[in-house]
Image (cartoon, grey):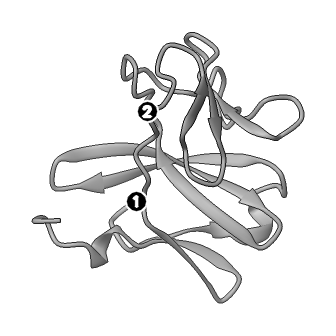
Amino acid sequence: MAPGARLAALDEIPDGGARGFAIRTPRGVVDIFVVRQGAWVGAYENACPHVGTPLDWTPDEFLDREGRHIVCATHGALFRIEDGVCLAGPCQGDQLEPWPVALRDGAVWDASATISDSE
């Protein structure tokens, strides 16, 4: 998908779940994921801050069984959904890299096209 693209209708991302996307950027393709909790959505780059590996152990499986935390498939680190801060694991205190998204007209949109390269 190109920057600024519509990612999905809100109801295509399960409430209490997450879904991955690949975004084309000037620096190459960036894998991200969007987490949904009710009408709130947030997104992060799909890379562990500890070793850079993808977080999902299978496509679109980013959360623990209870849907309370993001989990790294490589070493089980737990991250807060609302801000990506690592709560437990080898990267404790570090955080996931946020990705800008917008909720508009019942859909989730990539908002990275509104960010300049200097930011």
Residue visible at 37% across and 16% down?
51
Which residue is the site of mark 1? 1
- Which residue is at the far front? 93
Category of crowding for the residue at label 2, using alpha-carbon neighbours closer than 10 angstroms: few (below 14), some (14–19), many (at least 20): some
User: Which of the two residues, 91 or 12, is positioned nearer the viewer here?
Assistant: 91
Q: Residue at x 55, y 27 (%)?
A: 55
Find the residue positioned furthest to the left. 118
Image position of 64 with respect to 113: above or below: above
Question: Vertically, is 3 above or below 94?
Answer: below
The picture places residue 108, in percent across and down from the top left corner, at 60, 72
- State which tag comes first along the sequence, 1 or 2: 1
The part of the image, by quadrant, that contains residue 67 is top right
Q: Is residue 67 above or below residue 65?
A: below
Q: Amino acid at mark 2?
A: Asp
The local secondary structure at tag 1 comes to: loop
Q: Is residue 117 left or right of residue 8?
A: left
Count of marks placed on residues: 2
Quadrant of image for the C terminus: bottom left
Q: Nearer the viewer, residue 108 or 72?
A: 72
Pick whichever, 91 or 28, lies toward us: 91
Q: Please give left or right for residue 16 compared with residue 63 in the image.
A: right
Disc on res. 94? 2
For residue 7, above or below residue 62: below
Q: Residue furthest bottom?
A: 105
Q: Residues within 10 Å of mark 1 (few under 14, many from 20)?
A: some
Distance in Å between CA atoms under marks 1 and 2: 28 Å
Residue 20, how many percent across, how many down? 57, 45
